[in-house]
Structure formats: structure tokens, C-alpha cells
Image (cartoon, grey):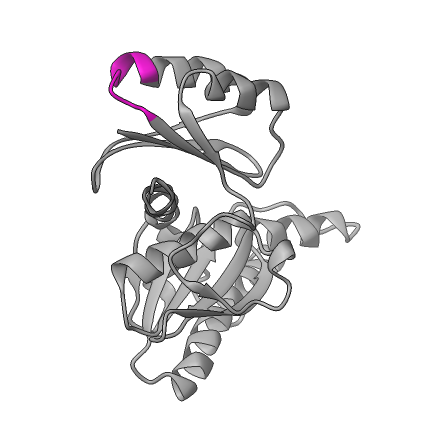
Amino acid sequence: MNLIIDVGNSSVKWAVFSEQNMLKRAGSTSEELISTFNSLLEEYPKISHAILSVVGSFSEATIQYIQERLSLLVLDQHTKVPFLNAYKTPETLGVDRLALVSAAATHYPEKNVLVIDAGSCITYDLLTDQNKYMGGAISPGLQMRYRALHTFTAKLPLLESKHPDAIVGDTTENAMHVGVAMAISKEIDGFINDFKEKYPDLTVILTGGDAHFLRDSLKNDIFANSNFLLEGLHFILEHNKD
């Protein structure tokens, strides 16, 4: 069994896999990390391998704690992945994007795939039908845009995300929702359309924490998969066992 540990900017996501099946998915704070780890090992004593993906902060002491109990792979830019990486600065490529492209390569072999991860940032990653990762784009995420409007102005409020009812905002709050929620949907659709001009047979995957909020407002056909990153980490771990 494999244990997947994804340390993000604001939380930690966990998953337990047996072969290709996800048996459990859980979340925790960084402070709960050791207790969650121990609970999962107690619940699934057959776990033998783990992979650690860190975007946020993580202590060396915690890494050592896990290594003493499991065979641990710490994902970085030197880890073997199931695709050809054509990114010109691979040392700067986030490990979360490596995992997402690995999931695309495993789930959709010999297809052109655009993976859109709607999280703290929105990332766009293109894998060609030659199994070649080309790169993509990074833009501010949904919550980041709301916080930016509030933080960098004197009077605009901090709002919860909401789909606007019309393209013309008739109050300041409605205008902000148009400028954030509606605009972000149009951005995503615009990127998809641009990619489809070069890759007409494009498969589009939408994942990340805000995928559920955005998917119904998109005009393009997409596949929503909230577990795509965790699956990608599992595939990388399996790819490196040999």
C-alpha cells in the first residue's frame, strides 16, 4: 500500500492507495501532521511506501520521522517521472505540476491533454500526444483575486466567492463578483480555446480546490477530477519503485 502526502500552501492532503484504488482521502493542518500520519498507519498497517510532495513548509525532523517508518520518496525536480519534460527551467517547476502532468500521462496516453488546477494559483499545463510536457501558464487563483482587491484598495470589502447574476454589476459587491468570478471563467475558456486552435483533439482536465465552483460556468467540455494530483503522486511513486 502507498501513502500519499501532499503539503500545500494552506493544508495537508492525504490518500491511501492499494494498487490503483484510492481507499481513503483525508485532510489535516500542518500541526496535525504527525497524529494524522500515525492514525493512518494504525488504520492501514500494510502501508509500506510513501511519497511526499511539499509546496508549503515542512521540517526535516518530520521527514526523518516518516523515513524511520516507511520507504519515503520526497518528490523534487530530479525524481523520475512518466513523461518527457521539455520545460526550459525544470529546476523551477513546482512539484504539484509534476504530479498533475504525471496523472495526465498515465490516464491519457498518446493524447493532447491540458490540465487546469484551480487552487491558490491557477496553473495550465500541456502534455502532447508524444508524451512531451511543454509548460503552460500561471495566474492568480480565485481567492487570491478577491484578497488582492481588498488588500490593495482602501474601501473594497473582502468577499466570499459567488457567481454573479449578470455581466453588469449593479452594486460594488456585484461588480467585484463580475470582475473575479465571471472573469476567471472567461479566462479559463479563453485559454482552452487558444490551446484547441493548435490541438483540436484536446482533452481538458479541471482539478483543484475551486474546480467545483468553476466547472459549471465554463462553456468548454472538461473532465473534473478532484483527485488528479493525488493520483499523479501515486503514479510517480509506482514509477520509482523499480
Q: Residue at x 45, y 51 (%)?
A: 80
Q: Residue at x 27, y 64 (%)?
A: 108
Judge whether 75 appears above or below 43 on screen. Answer: below
Q: How many numbered dots are placed on residues in this image?
A: 0
Front-most of residues 159 and 147: 147
Q: Is residue 160 visible?
A: yes
Q: Residue furthest right?
A: 154
Front-most of residues 171 and 64: 64
* Residue 52 location (% of width, % of height): 47, 34
* Residue 138 location (% of width, % of height): 58, 62
Residue 70's image quarter? top left
Q: Is residue 185 visible?
A: no
Could you tell me which quadrant the N terminus lies in?
top left
Front-most of residues 177 and 135: 135
* Residue 16 location (% of width, % of height): 29, 30
The kind of secondary structure the magenta stretch mainly shows is loop
Q: Residue at x 65, y 48 (%)?
A: 147
Q: Residue furthest bottom?
A: 197
Front-most of residues 50 and 11: 50
* Residue 214 location (% of width, % of height): 40, 58
Q: Is residue 155 magenta?
A: no
Which segment is the magenta one?
41-48
Residue 48's image quarter? top left
Could you tell me which quadrant the C terminus lies in?
top left
Residue 173's image quarter? bottom right
